[in-house]
Image: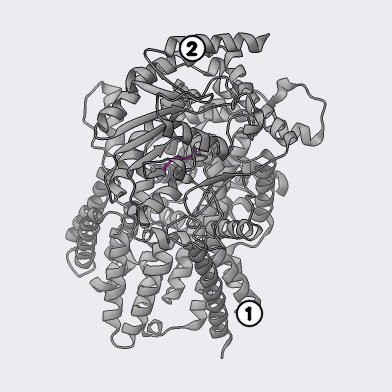
């Protein structure tokens, strides 16, 4: 189930919420059990076949964590920890990366390993990371008070299950155990409705609008020229941000409805003036995880300059690979790794760029790197980048020339085919750029929130408009053919 | 009441009021034809997506017919009630590909309370090119939508449906077709009547588009076209088939000739006759196609012409008529020779 669906908003959520608070009046454990069962239902709604896997993962990790958090000999604990981490890595590796490795081995060694075409279990990348963190911290004896119900809820709590934020057990476990959170708290519910509505609007109205243009553009990558390639890639840059941050906002808002504060995940990433700054603002919970569980254990910046650079590179390589089993994601990770190393070297040289230039460089780099992130293969990425560089011609949209009444010959004109008029896409792009650069982000809005009447009215309008756009009824394009 | 409670109250009051209004209005206006609502405020219905609307109507409303009419947008303008001695449902939709006919008829058979005895098929020449007939398409995605138990509820929770509901209300109150095509409660389509000036402009634009998109180098007669027709007849041996070609204006027909598609046109008619044994041909120079006022864009005729097509089919293959000739293996060559003569005359 996804948040931006009729079933979730009008059926699942109200039922789960109402019964949760009713049960809480009677029994806290029962209420949490209800929340857990609801989360399993949420998870299995698309494909119940995924459920046994997540149940197995939960059981193995909880028992492993339980064992290594006790006073057993350190050597035993370390062995069990290693096995536990290995279990998670193998599980993720098998389902997410098996075919990738098989394809590459087949290519390199002319082998014939059969591909499994496995369906990637939903959210496996997220719950694997959360549980690895739990195991590592159990080894540090930081998790001894947890019971299976709270643990399962921490992993499967439906607002964060599918796409994060990646939560650390220490951020929510106390909240799941706190009796204060049993009560219906109007302050949290009001704030939750506010943040959820913003997220829903960002996803359904903004991201989905850009998605249509980005999809169309990438589908015709061979015929893109200069103008439409830039609009296509910008459409994706904005789509990805509003989609992912919108989803995170919805998760944060939903958490608040249950009195659970989830960590922030985005903080105006396109305002960043360096690549390091970008990663402090984009998918922050992933950055925190990679820093704490990969960069620091590798030695962080404590083992000399070369190792520091190497560690930075490894973190981004892992990040790229985590995002997807494909060379495009690995290249994307490598690009960010190299850029982060350059950024560090530049910063330590003591030189500084002016803020606008620093922003422009950062934005352009991030924007170009998304081309690899979005492209289904390297060939498409190269085609799009070539078009952006003008190798496919610098043609101007016919309507643009006509609009400005420029005396330019027909050689420079082309039919704009991204699915909407050039002017419309250009205006959306410019306005959205202004929004991401100058408007407050949803976390700032959350922190400044006061439950005023006009905000309630605005929130209701955002919600209604977005919720009634979930079921798009569109006119058939070829009306008269 | 504290501020947060007031916030929640305002939020839910507005949400409930507005959503109730949208849902109720959509339910009453029924723009997607799933609730069988028929009243004077929705007696003009905009075309949204005929596949979705017509399948919705067939699935959710009583449906009992013995004949199905299949065709593309031109055929939508044929009044299903003008056929005599048969109970026809016009299941024509915009941009219907030859490869869709099969799943359309199969769906209609499943929905109808009485057995489907007959199918009337409208064929368009420009749909016989590789470009327009090779893509595999079917009704399956629309059928899947109907499988969703919440489908109807979801459609009324839609702001898009709400916009169409308002459009339909406006047309119904004005008692006038304000869109290019609109339907009444009985699945009969109406066209908007336009000035000569607008017609000429539409026709010129359509001809230009056909030159750029459908005729000339873009047109390659699909060598598998006949095979697709045969697949259709093989899959539906239990129904009688009546076939006709849709009449386009001579302005557009001339473009077809100029762009070098006359041979393809002949090949197409030969293939149709080979598969079905005979076809009512309306697409040739005649009193209807020579008169541009029968069309609003040179390609789509007005419903009055649709009535004439129905009348001609009612008369049967052997009747003599100035509009519509039933061609078979016996007379196809003489008919084509006649067309050649008329084209020569038009050139002069």
Q: Quadrant of the N terminus of chain A?
A: bottom left
Task: Please state the horizontal and vertical placement of residue A421, each as a whole percent of the image.
Answer: 66, 40
- Residue drawn 53% across the image and 30% down it: A221
Mark 1, residue position = A452
Please state if B5 lies on the left or on the right of A101 as rendered. right
Q: Which residues are magenta?
A: B90-95
Badge 1 element: loop
Mark 2, residue position = B336
- Residue drawn 37% across the image and 37% down it: B138
| Above or below: residue A212 compared with residue B331 | below
Please state if A140 lies on the left or on the right of A63 as rendered. right
Mark number for residue A283? Answer: none
Please state if A416 lies on the left or on the right of B219 as rendered. right
Task: Please state the horizontal and vertical placement of residue A360, each as a whole percent of the image.
Answer: 67, 43
- Residue drawn 65% across the image and 28% down it: B292
* Count of numbered tags: 2
Badge 2 element: helix
Mark 2 falls within which chain? B
Q: Residues within 10 Å of mark 1 (few under 14, many from 20)?
A: few
Q: Nearer the viewer, mark 1 or mark 2?
A: 2
């Amino acid at each position: 189930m996804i948040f931006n669906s009729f079933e979730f908003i009008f059926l699942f959520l109200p039922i789960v919420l109402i019964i949760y608070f009713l049960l809480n009046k009677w029994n806290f454990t029962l209420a949490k059990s209800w929340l857990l069962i609801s989360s399993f239902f949420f998870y299995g709604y698309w494909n119940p076949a995924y459920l046994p896997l997540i149940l197995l993962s939960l059981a193995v990790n909880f028992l492993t964590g339980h064992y290594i958090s006790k006073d057993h000999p350190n050597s035993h604990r370390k062995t069990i920890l290693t096995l536990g981490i290995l279990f998670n890595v193998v599980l993720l590796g098998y389902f997410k990366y098996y075919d990738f490795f098989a394809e590459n081995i087949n290519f390199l060694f002319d082998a014939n390993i059969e591909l499994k075409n496995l369906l990637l279990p939903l959210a496996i990348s997220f719950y694997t990371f959360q549980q690895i963190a739990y195991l590592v911290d159990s080894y540090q004896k930081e998790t001894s008070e947890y019971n299976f119900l709270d643990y399962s809820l921490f992993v499967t709590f439906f607002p964060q299950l599918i796409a994060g934020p990646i939560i650390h057990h220490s951020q929510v476990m106390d909240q799941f155990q706190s009796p204060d959170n049993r009560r219906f708290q109007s302050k949290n519910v009001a704030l939750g409705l506010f943040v959820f509505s913003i997220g829903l609007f960002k996803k359904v109205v903004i991201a989905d609008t850009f998605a249509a243009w980005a999809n169309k553009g990438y589908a015709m990558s061979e015929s893109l020229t200069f103008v439409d390639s830039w609009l296509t890639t910008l459409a994706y840059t904005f789509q990805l941000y509003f989609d992912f941050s919108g989803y995170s906002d919805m998760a944060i808002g939903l958490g608040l409805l249950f009195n659970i504060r989830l960590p922030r995940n985005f903080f105006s990433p396109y305002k960043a003036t360096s690549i390091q700054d970008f990663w402090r603002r984009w998918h922050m919970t992933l950055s925190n995880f990679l820093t704490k569980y990969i960069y620091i254990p590798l030695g962080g910046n404590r083992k000399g300059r070369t190792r520091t650079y190497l560690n930075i590179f490894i973190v981004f390589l892992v990040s790229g690979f985590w995002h997807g089993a494909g060379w495009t994601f690995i290249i994307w990770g490598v690009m960010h790794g190299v850029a982060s190393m350059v950024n560090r070297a530049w910063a330590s040289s003591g030189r500084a760029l002016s803020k606008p230039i620093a922003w422009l460089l950062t934005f352009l780099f991030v924007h170009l790197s998304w081309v690899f992130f979005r492209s289904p293969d390297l060939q498409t990425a190269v085609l799009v980048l070539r078009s952006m560089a003008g190798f496919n011609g610098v043609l101007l949209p016919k309507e643009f020339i006509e609009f400005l009444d420029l005396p330019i010959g027909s050689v420079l004109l082309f039919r704009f085919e991204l699915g909407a008029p050039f002017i419309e896409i250009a205006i959306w792009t410019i306005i959205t750029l202004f929004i991401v650069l100058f408007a407050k982000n949803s976390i700032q809005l959350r922190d400044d929130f006061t439950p005023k009447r006009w905000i309630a009215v605005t929130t209701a309008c955002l919600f209604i408009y977005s919720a009634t756009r979930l079921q798009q009824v569109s006119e058939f394009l070829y009306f008269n053919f | 009441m504290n501020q947060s409670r007031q916030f929640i109250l305002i939020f839910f009051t507005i949400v409930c009021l507005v959503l109730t209004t949208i849902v109720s209005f959509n339910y009453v206006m029924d723009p997607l034809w799933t609730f069988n609502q028929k009243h004077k405020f929705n007696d003009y219905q905009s075309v949204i997506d005929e596949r979705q609307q017509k399948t919705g109507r067939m699935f959710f409303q009583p449906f009992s017919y013995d004949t199905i009419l299949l065709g593309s947008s031109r055929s939508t303008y044929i009044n299903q009630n003008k056929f005599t001695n048969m109970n026809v449902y016009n299941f024509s939709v915009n941009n219907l590909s030859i490869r869709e006919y099969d799943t359309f008829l199969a769906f209609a058979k499943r929905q109808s309370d009485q057995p489907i005895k007959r199918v009337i098929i409208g064929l368009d020449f420009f749909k016989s090119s590789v470009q327009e007939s090779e893509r595999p398409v079917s009704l399956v995605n629309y059928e899947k939508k109907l499988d969703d138990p919440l489908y109807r509820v979801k459609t009324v929770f839609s702001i898009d449906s709400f916009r169409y509901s308002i459009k339909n209300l406006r047309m119904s109150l004005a008692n006038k077709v304000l869109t290019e095509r609109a339907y009444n409660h009985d699945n009969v389509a109406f066209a908007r009547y336009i000035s000569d000036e607008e017609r000429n402009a539409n026709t010129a634009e359509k001809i230009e588009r056909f030159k750029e998109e459908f005729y000339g180098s873009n047109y390659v007669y699909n060598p598998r076209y006949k095979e697709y027709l045969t697949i259709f007849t093989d899959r539906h041996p239990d129904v009688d088939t009546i076939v006709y070609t849709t009449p386009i204006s001579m302005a557009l027909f001339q473009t077809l000739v100029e762009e070098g598609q006359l041979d393809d046109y002949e090949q197409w008619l030969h293939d149709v006759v080979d598969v079905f044994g005979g076809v009512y041909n309306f697409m040739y120079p005649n009193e209807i196609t020579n008169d541009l006022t029968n069309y609003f864009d040179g390609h789509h005729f007005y419903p009055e012409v649709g009535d004439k097509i129905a009348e001609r089919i009612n008369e049967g293959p052997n009747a003599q008529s100035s509009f519509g000739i039933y061609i078979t293996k016996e007379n196809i060559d003489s008919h084509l020779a006649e067309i050649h003569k008329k084209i020569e005359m038009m050139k002069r």
